[in-house]
Amino acid sequence: MKYLFYSSALFITLALASSCRKKLEACAEFNKSAYFVNDTIFLNASCSENADTYSWKPQAGLQMIGSGKSSTEQFIILPLTGSLSRTINLTVSNSKSSRTISKSVVVL
């Protein structure tokens, strides 16, 4: 009987502890819905949840202005033949995990 009581108590404790863990979520928002070549894109990842570090990685047709290590970043749109969009990858991390998202924007 004691064994059943202790194992039940342990199970409940573990269930409560795991439900209290804060989940890491990656999020980034553009300041506009569309841009032109030579415009500056402002991206804000402060909507990410439980992130300690940020790592921005621009794809072709973008030049990063900052260090790529803060919750906000800016990119200059460069000419890119045959492409009407640009993509930026963001990885957010904490001591337990990391998450990566890709954000694309229309270039007119």
Image (tube, rainbow, N blue to C red):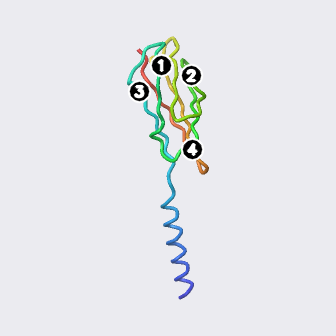
Q: Earlier in the sequence, mark 1 or mark 4?
A: 1
Lower sequence index among marks 2 and 3: 3
82 or 28, nearer to the observer: 28
Is label 1 in a helix, a strand or a loop?
A: strand
- Marks 3 and 1, how far apart at CA: 10 Å
| Nearer-the-camera pick, 44 or 27 | 44
Question: Which residue has dot 4 on it?
Answer: 52
Of labels 3 and 1, earlier in sequence is 3
Residue 102's place in the image compared with 61, above or below, is below
Earlier in the chain: of badge 4 and badge 3, it is 3
Q: Which residue is mark 2?
A: 65
Instruction: Give amino acid for label 4.
Output: Asp
Q: Secondary structure at mark 4?
A: loop
| Residue at 52% in and 28% down | 73
- Considering the numbered disc 3 on the image, is that residue within a helix, a strand or a loop? loop
The residue drawn where x is 49% and y is 60% is 20
Label 2: few (<14), some or many (≥20) within 10 Å?
Answer: few
Q: Position of residue 24 (x, y in %)?
A: 51, 48
Q: What residue is disc 3 on?
A: 31
Classify mark 4: residues with Cα within 10 Å, few (<14), some (14-19) or many (20+): some
* Residue at x 53% of width, y 68% of height: 14
> Horizontally, is 35 left or right of 63 in the view?
left
* Disc 2 + disc 3, Cβ < 8 Å: no
Residue 40 has which mark? 1
Extreme left residue here?
A: 33
* x, y percent for residue 108: 41, 14
Q: CA distance from mark 4 to mark 2?
A: 21 Å
Q: Residue at x 52, y 64 (%)?
A: 17
